[in-house]
Amino acid sequence: MPDVDIDPYLERCTHFLGRNQLGLIPCLVDCIFNASQVLTVNQLNPDNARNMTEILLRANPDFVDVSVAALLNCSANRKQWEKFQKRRFFGNYKCSLLPLYLRMCAVDYIYVNCPPSSWKSSKACEEAREHKVNCKCDLTGRLCRPRY
């Protein structure tokens, strides 16, 4: 997975960064999505999603198209989002979990559909990709069963 550049969002979202604040990661992701106006009433805006993705991945432009496709694909999966929404995270933060769900789902999608120019073909990577393609995992990745 490529590194993302959150520098353009630091002024608005810096209060979610800091030592020992891993519990604030859902709010950091939410803040970036809000700053980019990616979601409107829990609906993905494809143009704003592309703009945000181009900003975050400006050092890795070969990942932009697959990342946008991932966000579109994940936003269409309401059943998974509803399951994710029931999860509990540490803290009493007033932020939406939908952006975090979209990010986590997109990471899985991108891993399976990695641009060929960035794929590192090794036995371990190929086995991991095969596992992702053929298993239906919950969002934690811990429970896996064959796809039907």
Image: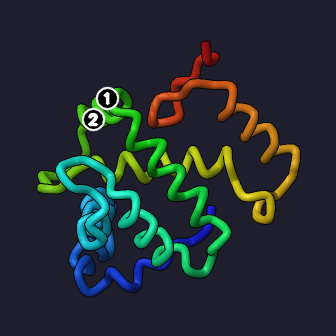
* Residue 23 in view (yes/no): no
Q: Which residue is mark 2?
A: 87
Of the numbered discs in the image, which one, if any, rests on residue 83? 1
- Residue type for callout 1: Lys
Real-space Cα distance between discs 1 and 2? Answer: 7 Å
Q: Is residue 62 left or right of residue 124?
A: left
Rendered residue at 46%/78% (across/down): 55
* 19 up-or-down from 45: above or below: below
Tell me the quadrant of the picture where the N terminus can be found.
bottom right
User: Dot 1 surroundings within 10 Å: few (below 14), some, or many (20 or more)?
Assistant: few
* Residue 146 in view (yes/no): yes
SS label for mark 1 = helix
Quadrant in which residue 23 is drawn: bottom left
Rendered residue at 57%/71% (across/down): 3
Quadrant in which residue 88 is drawn: top left
Rendered residue at 53%/35% (across/down): 141
Quick check: marks 1 and 2 in contact, CB under 8 Å? yes
Image coordinates for residue 75, horizontal then vertical, percent: 38, 43
